[in-house]
């Protein structure tokens, strides 16, 4: 099987990690396929990086996709959930991953503030992407979901797209 990168992006509170976990669980439960979930926050904590400046975020985003590339090149399905503030990183993905699926969760600020799972909005966190730090939002994603999207349908759509991305992907 050829590796695939499913790149789920959106701002904090958009549902990236929740959707990524659901995709990984469904691939295993329905098809017996073990996929790897890489979460931006967890990867950052693994290397104890607390640099949330624009430069620090760009370096971490590059790190995330390099780790994903190592796994994809070995045939793994990688589901990476990350804010992905930079078009340059997404352009790198499109150029360097043969099998690539980009999913953008374009959830309004009002909904993200209401969810606020990490209390970033409540605590007025500094260097927060999309709040007090500029973000280059995706313009070329394969799938885009807005506001109160149905997560079950989104998961099903992603799995269907995986079949299209790689014809040899035998689900």
Image: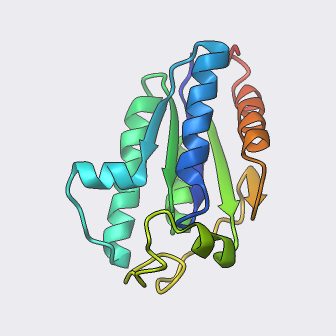
Task: Name the residue: 42% across, 23% down.
Answer: 74
Q: Nearer the viewer, residue 163 or 97?
A: 163
Q: Quadrant of the N terminus?
A: top right
Figure check: 124 above or below 62: below
Q: How many labels does the image show?
A: 0
Task: Name the residue: 71% across, 55% down.
Answer: 141
Task: Name the residue: 47% across, 37% down.
Answer: 37
Task: Name the residue: 38% across, 45% down.
Answer: 66
Figure check: 151 above or below 149: above
Question: What's the coloring here?
Answer: rainbow
Figure check: 63 above or below 160: below
Q: Which of 61 and 95 is in front in this view?
A: 61
Q: Is residue 98 visible?
A: no
Q: Nearer the viewer, residue 125 or 159?
A: 125
Q: Can residue 146 be seen in this view?
A: yes
Q: Which of 152 and 100 is in front in this view?
A: 152
Residue 32 locus on image (x, y percent): 59, 12
Q: In which quarter of the image is residue 171?
A: top right
Residue 11 locus on image (x, y percent): 56, 67
| Side (left or right) of 44 relative to 141 | left
| Side (left or right) of 123 relative to 134 | left
Residue 40 locus on image (x, y percent): 41, 53
Residue 15 locus on image (x, y percent): 60, 55
């Amino acid at each position: 099987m050829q590796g695939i990168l499913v790149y789920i992006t959106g701002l904090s509170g958009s549902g990236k990690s929740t959707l990524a976990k659901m995709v990984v669980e469904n691939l295993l439960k329905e098809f017996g396929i073990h996929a790897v979930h890489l979460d931006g926050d967890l990867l950052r904590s693994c290397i104890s990086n607390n640099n949330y400046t624009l430069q620090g975020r760009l370096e971490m985003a590059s790190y995330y996709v390099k780790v994903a590339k190592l796994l994809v090149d070995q045939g793994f399905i990688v589901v990476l959930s990350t804010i992905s503030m930079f078009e340059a990183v997404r352009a790198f993905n499109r150029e360097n991953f043969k099998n690539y699926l980009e999913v953008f969760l374009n959830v309004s600020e009002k909904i993200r503030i209401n969810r606020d799972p990490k209390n970033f909005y409540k605590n007025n966190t500094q260097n927060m992407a999309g709040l007090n730090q500029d973000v280059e939002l995706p313009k070329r994603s394969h799938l885009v979901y807005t506001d109160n999207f149905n997560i079950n349908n989104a998961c099903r759509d992603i799995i269907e797209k995986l079949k299209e991305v790689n014809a040899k992907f035998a689900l």
